[in-house]
């Protein structure tokens, strides 16, 4: 069996070529509609799990084993496009997704629309009609595409329709605010023989961004009519109709200036044209087919291979193999052409968002000044967290403490272990952890602000210089960054690092990245020991932690994992005002995550610690935990910590937040009790230990 | 221009898209369009996913899975082996058998 349904990726389509299996399975698949020739599309799939498949206008879930029994073939261009029965002139509407193409289509055709599917496809086909000055027109809304390569079904449909149905005119709808992205498709359209008209849509958006598009200059540069529009406001539609009419009547000035192929490839292109000319289907222009072959177009390669004698195709194949990267020069020439158009017709204001971003970046990505700004901003985050969240937490902490006392009074007649379980175990552990929600909320709001304004990408950019020193580049960069959120996805993310050496080095370094759970524990404990200076201590702890990460990275790179340099390019988004909703969602998701953790792993750990500290005698000093703690005392004394605090640190192995829960169970109100038994110096040691302690069990499982 | 872009990336000097645009003397949006095109052609790979790929791989049970991607860039392009090979080629029309 050749290719089967499981070989298709999400979004790919094919045609059923055969069914395999027992009689019952074949009958069942056929009853579902999997008959020979039926078009199918994979909508969604898991690695070896079930597939969601689009078939005959409905969606069907199939097991992996069943899907593997359905053999698939791809559709030919002839199967894909069947010429439409149209009246009058046919206009094809094309453009990238999200350029307002559907709005233009609706404005042109009004209520006279027909919606169906492309022949044998699940891609929607919309057609409609309109009349202008007594002439009827049929408009076909082609699928949104970025180019006319054979990269997707949508692109194949668009180009096959234009080539095979030969509409009277192609209207290319482009976004005036992002012309750079849109003109590549226009460059490809101009290579086909069909006349092209440019609908310069979203002029209102460009005006809002203070981008001035000189449409008359663009018209001269392109050599085709250009109609400025703001379709969402209904502007420009009558002008578009008039331009369509003059194009159809050949009264418009039409001298397209399409991008030329670089002189270095001219000889090969001409050679290729001669080699394939005899075998190119009538509907395709020979020069276009030759160019697409040079670009490495798989669909046309397969078509020509089928049509040409083996010997001739072998010669073509050899030529294409020699010039396999010619697509870079062809695409490069198109981008040069786009650059010329943009320079001629687009004027961006000096103080655009781009301009403001450049000015800010001049300072914020500057090596010393940018690093100083990063350090100050992080200090600001900690300062805000403690000065706003701290007092609220203190209030809530008192409340939980009083609630515990009240439970002891209300349940006075109940067995003492039940009373203590509720007051000491549940309220003392879980309840106390929950009082720290305000601190976490402020922390996440501050981080969300930095993220949503676009600053965090600059922080990542600045840290790249340090990564560079550690010999970590490109693919190691992302996992390390993810580690600041959580070490588990960071370790899992190292799978993208191809080099084994770099992967191991990255995995070894990830646990040294201070994750948000560790930061939360430090955010909770630091004010207990250091009051208003907590933000300075936290700042120093994070800085120290990162310094250790860098030193370790340098040592590993120097002595163990020297490796190949891999470069990367990252997008720095434009700075913008933060969106309250976006930050709200970010804070909400994080707090819900914390609450889920509190309700599961932290609650269980609290109850276990309470039980071990209560049984068998009801006194902590003679409990199981007390006996274990005294056994640990020689080690904890070295750190200047009571054994209870040391047990709290060990509990963080399951989840970092367990440290706080355990201390709350063992001490009650940690805010008042801890400073009495732990000195500030020992507290600093406790926090440093917490930052550098073995990673949580989830991270270790991921490393395995 | 695209070959110069690949060569600059292979050289490792610019890291930010805006720096690359300055080096190529074009607007950042043009560079972005080229990077997307090169990704489609298989010369580049976009690694950034805001943690989605990692979530799918092993974080389905994690309570913090929606908030673990602070600071991860929207796009992070790196050369594929095809891209590295093309960047190494100085000229065009290279005969692989030569």
Image (spheres, coloured by chain):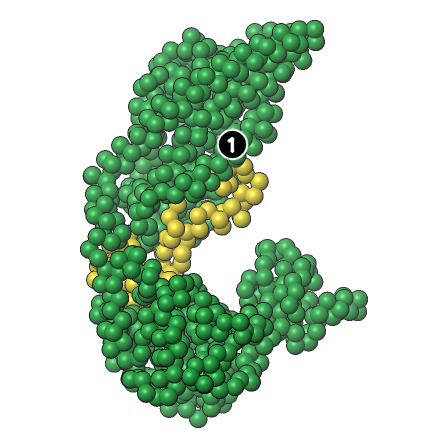
Chain colours: A green, B yellow
Q: Is residue A111 visible?
A: yes
Camera-side residue: B93 or B17? B17
Image: B32 above or below A324? above
Tell me if A132 is positioned left or right of A401 in this view: left
> In which image quadrant can residue A217 be found?
bottom left
Residue A614: image x %, image y %?
A: 62, 11
Give residue A103's position: percent from left, percent from top.
45, 66
Q: Residue at 59% of width from left, 67% of height from top?
A: A41
Judge whether A627 appears above or below A295 on screen: above
Callout 1 crowding tier (Cα within 10 Å): few <14, some 14–19, many ≥20: many
Q: Picture coordinates of residue A395 (x, y %)?
A: 46, 17
Q: Of all residues shown, which one is farthest toward the bottom? A: A278
Q: Quadrant of the N terminus of chain A?
A: bottom right
- Image-based side of A684 in relation to A212, left or right: right
Label 1 SS: helix
Residue visible at 23% across and 35% down? Answer: A372
Q: Which residue is mark 1?
A: A594
Q: Is residue A532 left or right of residue A46?
A: left
Who is closer to the viewer here, A588 or A302? A588
**In the rendered view, would you say A608 is above or below A308?**
above
């Amino acid at each position: 069996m050749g290719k089967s349904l499981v070989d298709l990726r999400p979004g790919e389509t094919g045609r059923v070529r055969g069914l395999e299996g027992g009689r019952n399975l074949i009958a069942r698949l056929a009853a579902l509609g999997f008959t020979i020739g039926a078009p199918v599309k994979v909508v969604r799939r898991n690695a070896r799990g079930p597939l969601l498949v689009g078939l005959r206008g409905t969606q069907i879930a199939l097991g992996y084993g069943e899907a593997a029994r359905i053999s698939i073939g791809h559709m030919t261009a002839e199967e894909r496009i069947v010429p439409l029965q149209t009246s009058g002139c046919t206009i094809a509407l094309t453009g990238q997704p999200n350029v307002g193409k559907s709005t233009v289509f609706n404005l042109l055709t009004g209520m006279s629309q027909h919606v169906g599917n492309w022949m044998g496809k699940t891609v929607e086909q919309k057609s409609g009609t309109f009349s202008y000055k007594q002439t009827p027109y049929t408009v076909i809304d082609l699928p949104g595409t970025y180019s006319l390569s054979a990269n997707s079904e949508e692109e194949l449909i668009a180009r096959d329709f234009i080539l095979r149905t030969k509409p009277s005119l192609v209207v290319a709808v482009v976004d005036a605010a992002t012309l750079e992205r849109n003109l590549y498709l226009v460059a490809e359209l101009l290579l086909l023989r069909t006349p092209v008209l440019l609908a310069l849509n979203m002029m209102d958006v460009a005006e809002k961004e203070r981008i001035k598009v000189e449409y008359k200059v663009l018209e001269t540069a392109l050599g085709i009519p250009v109609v400025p529009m703001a379709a969402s406001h209904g502007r420009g539609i009558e002008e578009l109709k008039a331009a369509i009419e003059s194009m159809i009547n050949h009264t418009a000035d039409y001298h397209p200036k399409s991008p030329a192929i670089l002189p270095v490839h001219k000889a090969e292109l001409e050679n290729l044209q001669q080699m394939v000319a005899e075998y190119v289907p009538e509907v395709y222009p020979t020069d276009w087919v030759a160019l697409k072959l040079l670009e490495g177009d798989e669909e046309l390669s397969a078509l020509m291979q089928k049509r040409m004698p083996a010997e001739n195709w072998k010669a073509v194949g050899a030529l294409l193999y020699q010039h396999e990267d010619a697509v870079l020069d062809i695409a490069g020439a198109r981008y040069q052409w786009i650059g010329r158009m943009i320079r001629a017709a687009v004027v961006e204001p000096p103080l655009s968002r781009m301009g403001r971003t450049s000015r800010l970046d001049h300072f914020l990505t500057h090596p010393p000044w940018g690093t100083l700004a990063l350090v100050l901003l992080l200090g600001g985050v900690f300062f805000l967290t403690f000065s706003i969240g701290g007092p609220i937490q203190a209030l809530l902490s008192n409340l939980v403490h009083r609630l515990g006392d009240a439970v002891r009074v209300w349940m006075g007649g109940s067995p003492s272990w039940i009373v203590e379980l509720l007051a000491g175990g549940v309220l003392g552990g879980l309840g106390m952890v929950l009082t720290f929600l305000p601190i976490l909320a402020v922390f996440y709001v501050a981080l969300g602000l930095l993220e949503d304004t676009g600053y965090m990408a600059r922080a990542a950019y600045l840290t790249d210089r340090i990564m560079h020193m550690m010999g970590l580049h490109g693919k190691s960069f992302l996992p390390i960054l993810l580690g600041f959120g959580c070490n588990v996805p960071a370790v899992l993310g190292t799978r993208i690092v191809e080099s084994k050496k770099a992967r191991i080095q990255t995995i070894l370094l990830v646990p040294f990245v201070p994750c948000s759970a560790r930061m939360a524990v430090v955010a909770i404990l630091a004010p207990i020991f250091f009051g208003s200076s907590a933000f300075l201590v936290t700042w120093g702890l994070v800085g120290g932690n990162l310094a250790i990460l860098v030193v370790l990275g340098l040592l590993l790179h120097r002595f163990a994992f020297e490796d190949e340099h891999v470069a990367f390019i990252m997008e720095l988004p434009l700075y913008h005002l933060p969106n309250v909703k976006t930050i709200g969602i970010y804070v909400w998701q994080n707090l819900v995550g914390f609450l889920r953790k509190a309700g599961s792993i932290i609650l269980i750990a609290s109850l276990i610690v309470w039980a071990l500290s209560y049984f068998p005698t009801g006194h902590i000093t003679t409990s199981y935990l007390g006996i274990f703690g005294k056994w640990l005392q020689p080690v904890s004394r070295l750190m200047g910590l009571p054994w209870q605090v040391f047990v709290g640190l060990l509990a963080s192995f399951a989840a970092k937040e367990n440290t706080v829960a355990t201390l709350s169970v063992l001490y009650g109100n940690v805010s008042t009790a801890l400073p009495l038994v732990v000195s500030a110096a020992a507290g600093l040691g406790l926090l440093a230990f917490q930052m550098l302690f073995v990673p949580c069990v989830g991270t270790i499982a991921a490393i395995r | 221009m695209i070959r110069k872009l690949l060569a600059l990336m292979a050289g490792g000097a610019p890291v930010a898209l805006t720096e690359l645009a300055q080096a190529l003397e074009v607007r950042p949006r043009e560079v972005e369009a080229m990077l997307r095109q090169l990704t489609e052609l298989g010369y580049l790979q976009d690694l950034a996913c805001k943690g989605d790929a990692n979530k799918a791989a092993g974080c389905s049970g994690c309570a913090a899975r929606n908030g673990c991607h602070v600071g991860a860039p929207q796009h992070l392009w790196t050369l594929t082996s095809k891209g590295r090979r093309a960047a190494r080629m100085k000229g065009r029309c290279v005969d692989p058998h030569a």
